[in-house]
Every structure is written in C-alpha cells, then in structure tokens.
Amino acid sequence: MRVILADDERNVRSAVKLLLEQEQNVEIVCETENLTGVIEKFSDLRPDLLLIDWDLRLPAMNRAMVMLLRHRCPGMR
C-alpha cells in the first residue's frame, strides 16, 4: 500500500511513519507538513492512502484539496 503522510507536527509524522513501516505491505511514498506538498507530487506518487491531519493549517481548504485529490485518484482511501 502506497501512503502519503501529511501532518504539520514533525513528531507525529515520525511516530506514525515508524508504526506504518512495521507493516510489510506499506510504503511511505511522501511525507509533508502541508497539503500543498501533496498536490505538487500527487500525480507521480499515485497513493493508495492519504493519511492527513484534518486540521492541517486551513481546514476548509483541506476539504477542497482532498476532494480534488479523490477526483484525480478515485481508488484512493
């Protein structure tokens, strides 16, 4: 499973990454502190899962960005 991990707290990202890397079928393809970083890399990365901190800086904008990303990759969870 290809995962993008987005959280503005570095310690949280590190802890979640450490947990996910214990799983054999999980690959962290991108870590970022904001969804702008995800948008820039999304087309090339094609994740199966986008794991984000929902309150990441601008919650209203996050909802719009997530909807855009889901439209670009309908199979993503």
Image (spheres, grey):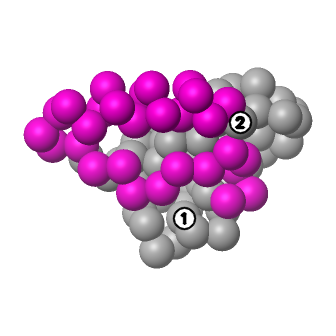
Q: x and y percent of residue 21 in the render?
A: 26, 37
Residue at 54%, 64% (x, y): give it.
42
Q: Nearer the viewer, residue 7 or 70?
A: 7
- In reply to whether residue 26 is colored magenta, the answer given is yes
Q: Quadrant of residue 18?
A: top left
Residue 69 badge: none
Question: Comparing marks 1 and 2, which lies closer to the viewer?
Answer: 2
- On the rendered structure, is 21 left or right of 33? left
Q: Label 1, secondary structure: give it.
A: helix
> Is residue 76 something that shows in the picture?
no
| Residue receiving disc 1 | 42
Residue situated furthest left in the rendering:
24
Residue type at numbered disc 2:
Asp
Position of residue 55 measured from the top left corner of the image (x, y, whole percent): 76, 25
Q: Is residue 35 visible to the viewer in this orientation of the structure? A: yes
Measuring 43% from the left and 28% from the top, which residue is drawn there? 16
**Do labels 1 and 2 touch, CB within 8 Å?**
no
Callout 2: 10 Å neighbours few (<14), some, many (20+)?
Answer: some
Depth check, front residue: 68 or 4:
4
Q: Is residue 77 magenta?
A: no
Q: Secondary structure at mark 2?
A: loop
Whether residue 7 is situated above or below residue 19 in the rendered picture: below
Residue 23, percent from left and from top:
18, 33
Q: Which residues are magenta?
A: 9-37
Tell me what residue is drawn at x 71 percent, y 36 percent.
8
> Where does residue 25 sit, x and y in percent of width and height?
15, 43
Identify which amino acid the numbered label 1 is placed on.
Phe
The residue at 46%/74% (across/down) is 44
Q: Is residue 2 left or right of residue 31?
A: left
Q: Quadrant of the C terminus?
A: top left
The residue carrying mark 2 is 8
